[in-house]
Amino acid sequence: MDTQKAFGHGRDIALDAIEDMGKVFDGKHERFVPQAMTGLLVTVMSCVYAHAPTSEAADELIAQARAWAEQEVEKGED
């Protein structure tokens, strides 16, 4: 395994979770999707903090992920 493969596996797992969330809500109770997404984010971020060597390292990882996510959104807007 290398960095790219690990990133890809993590992305695929997240996409599967989002797909499952879509099946749960599937046009019903859509006003609760933000709370579901918050639950997903809190769980992932809690895991990052639990496994990072320091909270500062976790903050850096989360900041990098946010920056990459913003770049992905910007690419999609072109």
Image (spheres, grey):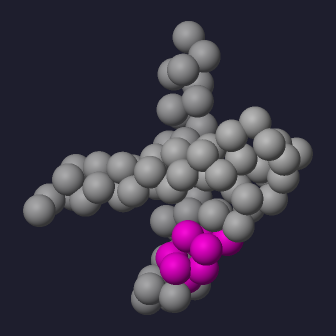
Magenta-colored span:
42-49
Task: Give the main secondary structure, helix, strand or loop, of the magenta stretch.
Answer: helix
Examine the image and state in which quarter residue 56 appears. bottom right
Q: Position of residue 66 (x, y in %)?
A: 59, 51
Q: Camera-side residue: 7 or 18?
A: 18
* Front residue of 10 and 55: 10
Tell me which residue sits at (62%, 44%) in the image: 22
User: Does residue 4 appear to the left or right of 52 in the view shown?
Assistant: left
In the rendered view, tell whether residue 32 sits above or below residue 39.
above
Query: In the image, is residue 26 part of the stretch drawn in magenta?
Result: no
Residue 9, percent from left and from top = 29, 55
Residue at 60% in and 38% down? 70
Q: Residue at x 84, y 47 (%)?
A: 29
Assign the C terminus to one quadrant of the image. Answer: top right
The residue at 29%/49% (across/down) is 8
- Lateral position of residue 10 relative to residue 62, left or right: left
Tell me if residue 4 comes above or below residue 43 in the rendering.
above
For this orientation, the residue located farthest to the right is 31
Quarter residue 51 falls in: bottom left
Residue 65, position as x, y percentages in the image: 51, 54
- Count the numbered circles shown: 0
Q: Is residue 42 visible?
A: yes
Q: Is residue 36 left or right of residue 50?
A: right
Quadrant holding the N terminus: bottom left
List x then y, in percent, for residue 43. 61, 74
